[in-house]
Image: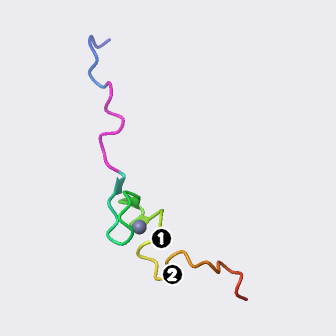
Amino acid sequence: MVKGTTSFGKHSRHKVHIVCRRCGHRSFNVKKKRCSYCGFPDPRWRKYSWGKHR
Ligand SMILES: [Zn+2]
């Protein structure tokens, strides 16, 4: 066994969300390449009519 805490607290080492340049929130998923807050780079910016306008 490994003595000491070698791999302790390295869970959040890799950043997943970066600052979105559209909404400013740190919700831009690097892997998905999309902001989970505003939906960047999706053209529709969280339209208020999400499927209601039809
Ligand atoms: Zn955003």
Mark 1 Cα shell of 10 Å, populated few (<14), some (14-19), many (≥20): some
Q: Does the CB distance between marks 2 and 1 fall below 8 Å?
A: yes
Which quadrant would the C terminus be assigned to in this image?
Answer: bottom right
Which of the 4 image quadrants contains residue 48? bottom right
Residue at 42%, 72% (x, y): give it.
40
Q: Nearer the viewer, residue 32 or 23?
A: 23
What number is the disc on residue 39? 1
> Considering the numbered disc 1 on the image, is that residue within a helix, a strand or a loop?
loop
Which residues lie in the magenta part? 8-15
For residue 44, the mark is 2
Q: Residue at x 48, y 62 (%)?
A: 36
Mark 1 near ligand 1 (CB under 8 Å)? yes
Q: Is residue 18 above or below residue 7?
A: below
Predominant SS along the magenta part = loop
Residue 49, given in percent of the width and then of the height, sits at 65, 81
- How many numbered dots are placed on residues in this image? 2
Q: Residues within 10 Å of mark 2 (few under 14, many from 20)?
A: few
Relative depth, front residue between 37 and 6: 37
**11 falls in the magenta region:** yes
- Which three-letter amino acid code belongs to the residue tagged 1? Gly
Secondary structure of residue under mark 2: loop
**Relative to 50, residue 9 above or below:** above
Q: CA distance from mark 2 to mark 1?
A: 8 Å
Quadrant in the picture for the N terminus: top left
Q: Which image quadrant for residue 17?
A: bottom left
Q: Mark 1 or mark 2, which is nearer the start of the sequence?
A: 1
- Type of amino acid at the residue the image marks with label 2: Arg
Horizontally, is 50 left or right of 31 in the view?
right
**Quadrant where ligand 1 appears:** bottom left
Q: Is residue 11 above or below residue 7?
A: below
Q: Position of residue 8 (x, y in %)?
A: 32, 24
